[in-house]
Amino acid sequence: MPKDLCVKAERMVGEPVRRTLLRLGLFDRSRRIKTTDDSVLIPISRRPKPEERAALKKMGSIKVVSADLLVASARPKDLTGVLDGKLPPYLLAQLPRSYDVVGDIVVLESLSTDLFPHKAEIGAALMALHPGVKTVLLKTGKVEGEFRVPRLEVLAGRERFDTVHTEYGMRFKVDLSKVYFSPRLGSERYRVASSVSDGETVVDMFAGVGPFSLMIAKHVKAKVYSVDLNPDAIELLKENIRLNKLRGEVIPLCGDAREFSKQLTGVADRVIMNLPASSLSFLDTASEILKSGGGMIHLYIFAPDEPLINAENFTEVADKLFKCLEIRGMRVVKPVAPKEWQVALDVWASK
C-alpha cells in the first residue's frame, strides 16, 4: 500500500512549518498530522520545489519522507459549523471568528449582546470543536490594573483557571485569574529568542510567567533577568523554570522594573519591553539598564490607524534618551481593538 508524502520536522518548530506549508499551498488537509516525542510529520500534497525546500529549511532540519497517516475527520471546522441549525442565521453571523486556546482552556474575548443569552451553547460548542479542552472562559472586562488581569466567567467545563500551555516545545504553567498571558505572541517570542546569542545578558522588564525569558534560555546560554511586579507571576515563573530544561540562566526578580535599575545598571546587551500600554514611559529605565556601548531593545507598543507609521512616533521620546538610535525591524503583531494594533519594534540604541 502506498504511503503518504509528508514533511518531517522537529516538534518545536512544527507549527511554523505547518503555516509555511499552508502558505506555499503544500499542506494536505485530507490527512492528519502525526507527532512523536521529538518530531512531527505534516502531510503534503506534492514534493516541494527547490525554492520551497529552501524556505522550509530556514526553520531547521527538514526532511521529505513517506509514512502512514490517518485520514482527517470530516467534523465541523469552526464554531459556525458546530452551531449551524442550532442558532438562527443572524446570530451565526455574530459568532466570534477567533479566540485563544491556552493549554486546555479556550478564552473568548467578548460576545455581542445578542449572543450573550446563548453563551452556554457557545461554550459547549467550543468544547465539541476542541475535544482536548476542559474549560471555556469569557472575558467580562478589559485587561486592567497593575497586573493586567482580566475578569473571567466560566461558560463550560470545569471551573478552573490554571493550565499548562505548550509552545515550541516549552511548557508554561499559567493561572489566567492571576496573571496576563497571550498565546498569540508565540511566534514573536520564538523570533526574539532566535536572535539572541550565547553569552548575552538580557533583561525582560515585564516578564509575566516568563515566556520570553524561558524561550531565550532554552535556546542559548544567556543570562536573563526576569522582572515582574506581580508576585503570582513570579511564583509561576519559578515553577516554569523547573518545568523546562534550559541552556541559559533565568533570574526572577519581583518588583517594579524601575526599582531594579540601579542593581541592573549597564548589564544588558538586550532589553525586552512587552508592556504595550505603558512601555514608552519605561524607556528611561531601559536606557539605564543597557550596556554603555549600546544594545537591542525589543519594544512593544499600541498604535492606531496606520500602525507602522504611528509606531515611529516613539522616536520623539527615545531621541531624548539615546545618542544613537536605529530601528532595525518593525512589524504588526496583532489587532487589539478596532483601528488599533500591537506593534513590535527592534531598536538598536546607545547612550
Image (tube, rainbow, N blue to C red):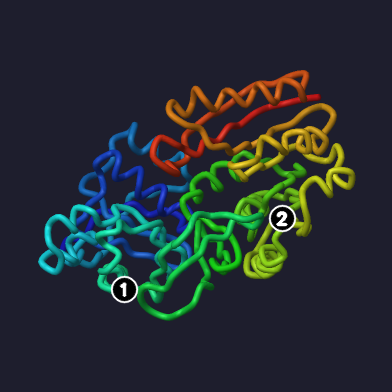
Between discs 1 and 2, the one toward the N terminus? 1
Q: Is residue 320 above or below residue 47?
A: above
Residue 89 placement (x, y as % from top left): 12, 57
Q: Residue at x 80, y 45 (%)?
A: 258
The label nearer to you, 1 versus 2, is: 2
**Residue 51 sits in quarter:** top left
Occupied quadrant, residue 107: bottom left
Task: Please name whichever residue, 99 or 217, is drawn nearer the observer in this view of the structure.
Answer: 99
- Residue most toward the bottom? 158
Q: Residue 53: horizontal and vertical position, in percent? A: 36, 38
Taking the spot 43% from the left edge, 60% from the top edge, the residue there is 39
Residue holding disc 2: 228
Mark 2 residue type: Asp
Q: Which residue appears farthest toward the front when viewing the image?
A: 113
- Left or right: where 340 falls relative to 178: left
Q: Which mark is residue 62?
A: none
Residue at the (27%, 68%) spot, across then down = 117
Q: Quadrant of the C terminus?
A: top right
> Which corner quadrant holds the N terminus?
bottom left
- Callout 1 environment at 10 Å: few (<14), some (14 to 19), or many (20+)? few
- Which of the 4 quarters of the picture holds residue 248? bottom right
Q: Image check: 224 left or right of 215? A: right
What residue sits right under mark 1 in the picture? 131
Residue 337 in the image: state x and y as whole percent.
Answer: 42, 43
Find numbered disc 2 in the image and state the secondary structure of the residue it sits on. Answer: strand
Q: Please give left or right for residue 105 compared with residue 91 in the image.
A: right
- Which residue is depicted at the point 50% across and 58% down? 167
User: Does dot 1 land on a helix, a strand or a loop?
Assistant: loop
